[in-house]
Amino acid sequence: MQNDPLILASKSEIRATLLQNAGLEFETIAARVDEEMIKTSLIAEGASPRDVADALAEMKAKKIAQKGVAGLVIGCDQVLDFKGSILSKPTSPEHAVEQLSHLQGNRHSLLSAAVIYENGKPVWRHVGQVRLLMRPLSQNHIETYVEKNWESIQHAVGCYKLEEEGVRFFSRIDGDYFNVLGLPLLELISYLTLRGTLTT
């Protein structure tokens, strides 16, 4: 049973599917914010990758909450932290090859942030982290992968999808798989349960 209306401030099909599979009822309203401008500004101010993820998630929730919608607005964002720097979504297949060439044989982290707004104010936030170790990859393997999977990975942080062929790139993953998919789902459900939004 669900006692509060939920609004997902995201156009991510994966996040929507995760909430649907968990049995949550929600409305989707895409939050239009200039992510790259915000990200660039925050980085220039010395913000950490974790703070950038949190700020972007909050701005999305705030954008929709300011429209006066009733209920809890969930804003989400995910960033990739590679040696203290943020890698953004690839802008072209060549860019994807370049990013994967940097990531191969190295560790990186995915930071998945969620912020909930209620009555125009933030009431909950969480940033989940997953650490991943990518296998050494040949240049030919990377180029073949990108050419074959570009349509699927072009909107993916890190230029791979772990739920698809990209899983073959990794030798170790430390953390919650839901955070890989871009949503700290367990923590979100725990909060909604504790506040009485979700009841059994």
Image: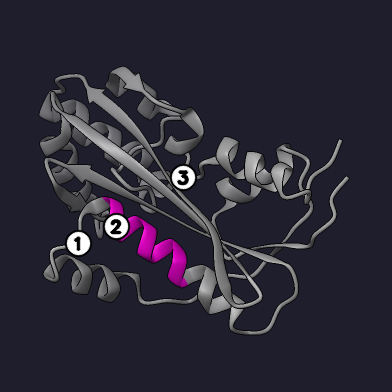
Compute the Cα span from label 3 to label 2.
16 Å
Per the image, the residue denoted by label 3 is 182
- The answer to which of marks 1 and 3 sits earlier in the sequence is 1
Give the image quarter of residue 140: top left
**Residue located beneath label 1 in the image:** 47
Q: What is the distance, in whole Å, between disc 2 and disc 1 at their CAs?
A: 6 Å
SS at mark 2 in the image: helix
Identity of the residue drawn at 45% across and 37% down: 179
Q: Tell me if I can see residue 21 in this picture.
A: yes
At label 1, the amino acid type is Ala
Residue 86 in picture, x, y percent from top left: 20, 52
Amino acid type indicated by mark 3: Gly
* Category of crowding for the residue at label 1, using alpha-carbon neighbours closer than 10 angstroms: few (below 14), some (14–19), many (at least 20): some
- Check disc 1 and report its element: helix, strand or loop: loop
From this viewpoint, which residue is outermost toward the top?
171
* Residue 3: % across, % down: 85, 55
Q: Bounds of the magenta span?
A: 50-59
Looking at the image, which residue is at 20% across and 70% down?
A: 40
Q: Quadrant of the C terminus?
A: top right
User: Could you tell me what secondary structure mostly forms the magenta stretch?
Assistant: helix
Alpha carbon of mark 1 to alpha carbon of mark 3: how far?
20 Å
